[in-house]
Amino acid sequence: MTAVFLNSSFLILQDIGMSELLLIAVVVLLLFGGKKIPELMRGLGKGIREFNDAKNNVRQEIEEGMREKPVQAAAPATTDAPHTSTEDAPLPKA
């Protein structure tokens, strides 16, 4: 099963047919039992909801950052000290 991410959230399910989904459902039912499945699905739904909320928050922050005006560059710092060149200075005697 190979998947390339596009705009679809369910692209992973593209290569899974109805028989595979039925097999997965039977295995989950056998492993966890009928009473535990609703609790598992609630947990899965909560996890997906939290993931989507976090994804939307990141997207919103990025969009807000792109809408902000760019900060103007600060003027270059100047020093009051005179500029001296080391090329013209006499070498010390050894």
Image: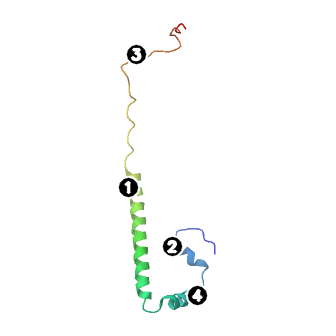
Pointer 3 or 2: first along the chain: 2
* Tag 1 residue: 64
Mark 2 / mark 1, whichever is N-terminal: 2
Percent position (x, y) of residue 6?
Answer: 55, 68
| Helix, strand or loop at mark 1 | helix
The one nearer the camera, 54 or 72, is: 54
For the point 37% across and 46% down, the residue is: 69
Secondary element under disc 3, as helix, strand or loop, is loop
**Secondary-structure class at tag 4:** helix
* Residue 55 x/y as whole percent: 43, 65
Mark carried by residue 82: 3
| Left or right: residue 74 compared with residue 93 | left
Q: Nearer the viewer, mark 3 or mark 2?
A: 3
Q: Residues within 10 Å of mark 1 (few under 14, many from 20)?
A: few
Question: CA separation, marks 4 and 2?
Answer: 18 Å
Q: Quadrant of the N terminus?
A: bottom right
Characterize the local packing of mark 3: few (<14), some (14-19) or many (20 or more) Cα atoms within 10 angstroms.
few
> According to the image, label 4 marks what residue?
18
Q: Earlier in the sequence, mark 4 or mark 1?
A: 4
Reading the chain from its start, which is encountered first: label 3 or label 4? 4
The answer to whether the residue labelled 2 contacts the one labelled 1, judged by CB atoms less than 8 Å apart, is no
Crowding near the residue tagged with mark 4, few <14, some 14–19, many ≥20 C-alpha atoms within 10 Å: few
According to the image, label 2 marks what residue? Answer: 9
* Residue closer to the observer: 29 or 45: 29
- Residue type of the residue flagged with mark 1: Glu
Quadrant hosting residue 40: bottom left
The reply to whether callout 4 and callout 2 are in contact (CB within 8 Å) is no
Residue 79, which numbered label?
none
Marks 1 and 3, the one that precedes in the sequence: 1
Residue at (60% x, 89% y) in the render: 19
CA separation, marks 4 and 1? 42 Å
Residue type, numbered disc 3 = Pro
